Amino acid sequence: MCTGIEVIYVRLLNENTYVCRPVEAIKLDDFTFRILPTEDYDPYDEEWEFPPGKIVRCRKELVNNYMSFVAFEEVIR
């Protein structure tokens, strides 16, 4: 059951520091989302920990002084 689109954060790999990118995702339940591609998504420019299309479980973390959903594991269905 889809409950709308929200912004979640996905960690970028190989950035020499901890960096998360805001992305839109379809909310499937309270903490599970399907990541949507961005218009400028380029896997050769940014390596997302979970690329578009993946279903991920998120947890609430402080990002830029706001509690936000951050993806931490892929959900295999």
Image (spheres, rainbow, N blue to C red):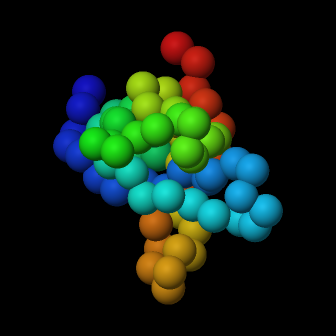
The quarter of the rendered structure image containing the N terminus is: top left
Q: Front-most of 40 and 21?
A: 40
User: Image height check: is 51 above or below 45?
Assistant: above
User: Image height check: is 12 above or below 48?
Assistant: below
View extreme (front): residue: 44
> On the picture, is 49 further left or further right than 34?
right
* Percent position of residue 55, x then y: 48, 29
Kindly identify the residue that appears in the image at 49 percent across and 27 percent down.
54
> On the picture, is 31 further left or further right than 25?
right
Can residue 39 be seen in the rendering of this structure? Answer: yes
Kindly identify the residue that appears in the image at 71 percent across and 65 percent down.
18
> On the picture, is 7 further left or further right than 14?
left
Kindly identify the residue that appears in the image at 28 percent across and 42 percent down.
39
* Percent position of residue 8, x then y: 42, 54
Can residue 71 be seen in the rendering of this structure? Answer: no
View extreme (right): residue: 16
Q: How many numbered marks have been drawn onto this rendered protein structure?
A: 0
* Percent position of residue 72, x then y: 64, 46
Q: Front-most of 31 and 49?
A: 49
* Percent position of residue 2, x then y: 24, 32
Kindly identify the residue that appears in the image at 42 percent across and 26 percent down.
53
View extreme (left): residue: 4
View extreme (top): residue: 77
